[in-house]
């Protein structure tokens, strides 16, 4: 569960997040959309602890994101998020990009990561693109 309660964020005099409050259940898929500059990326970065917020609270699986004692890398390993810019490694194929964090962060074997990665690609209709590099994929495929 991801819980936000009254989260606000300022950049100087500009308030980009205004008392955001929501709860997202485990397994729920959420799309954050809105016009450019409306705070979408800032909100997602705050949830992941990549960007500090000024007031309110964020809890992920009961753990406070704003607590200095929180092990943020361990917490991030439990959260799956996709940003506007996917930042795929250009020297790795689509499948290799999917496998990387599974092996390094989650400790899966290469075979386990490949099976999971191929399953995910198949789920979104992209299995035939597994061995392609980002430069060979459209923006939507990336």
Image (cartoon, rainbow, N blue to C red):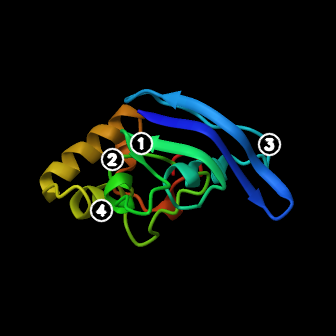
Q: Are marks 4 and 3 in contact (CB under 8 Å)?
A: no
Question: What residue appears at the point 41 percent right and 34 percent down from the top-left corner?
Answer: 125
- Which mark is first along the chain, 4 or 1? 1
Q: Nearer the viewer, mark 1 or mark 4?
A: 1
Q: Judge the density around disc 1: few (<14), some (14-19), many (≥20) Cα neighbours within 10 Å.
A: many
Q: Judge the density around disc 4: few (<14), some (14-19), many (≥20) Cα neighbours within 10 Å.
A: some
- Which mark is first along the chain, 4 or 2? 2
* Secondary element at tag 4: helix
Query: Which residue was labeled with disc 4?
Result: 100
Query: Which residue was labeled with disc 2?
Result: 78
Out of 120 and 40, give the one closest to the viewer: 40
The label on residue 35 is 3
Q: Judge the density around disc 2: few (<14), some (14-19), many (≥20) Cα neighbours within 10 Å.
A: few
Q: CA distance from mark 1 to mark 3?
A: 26 Å
Q: Residue 90, how many percent across, how many down?
A: 46, 70
- 129 relative position to 7: left or right: left
Q: Are marks 2 and 1 in contact (CB under 8 Å)?
A: yes
Q: Nearer the viewer, mark 2 or mark 1?
A: 1
Q: Residue furthest right?
A: 13
Question: What residue appears at the point 53 percent right and 61 percent down from the top-left corner?
Answer: 50
Q: CA distance from mark 3 to mark 2?
A: 28 Å
- Which mark is first along the chain, 1 or 2? 1
- Which mark is first along the chain, 3 or 1? 3
Q: Residue 70, how many percent across, how many down?
A: 37, 58
Out of 75 and 125, give the one closest to the viewer: 75
Asked which quadrant contains residue 101, the reply is: bottom left
Query: Which residue was labeled with disc 1?
Result: 60
Q: CA distance from mark 1 to mark 4?
A: 23 Å
Q: CA distance from mark 4 to mark 3?
A: 32 Å
Q: Is residue 34 above or below residue 134?
A: above
Q: Is residue 31 above or below residue 17?
A: above
């Amino acid at each position: 569960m991801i819980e936000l309660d009254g989260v606000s964020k300022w950049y100087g005099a500009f308030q980009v997040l205004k008392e955001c409050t929501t709860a997202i259940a485990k397994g729920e898929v959420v799309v954050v959309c809105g016009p450019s500059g409306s705070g979408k990326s800032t909100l997602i970065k705050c949830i992941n602890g990549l960007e500090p917020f000024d007031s309110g609270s964020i809890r992920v699986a009961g753990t406070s994101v704003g607590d200095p004692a929180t092990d943020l890398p361990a917490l991030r390993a439990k959260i799956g998020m996709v940003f506007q810019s996917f930042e795929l490694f250009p020297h790795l194929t689509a499948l290799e990009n999917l496998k990387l964090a599974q092996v390094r962060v989650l400790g899966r074997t290469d075979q386990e990561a490949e099976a999971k990665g191929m399953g995910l690609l198949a789920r979104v209709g992209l299995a035939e693109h597994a061995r392609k590099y980002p430069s060979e994929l459209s923006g939507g495929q990336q």
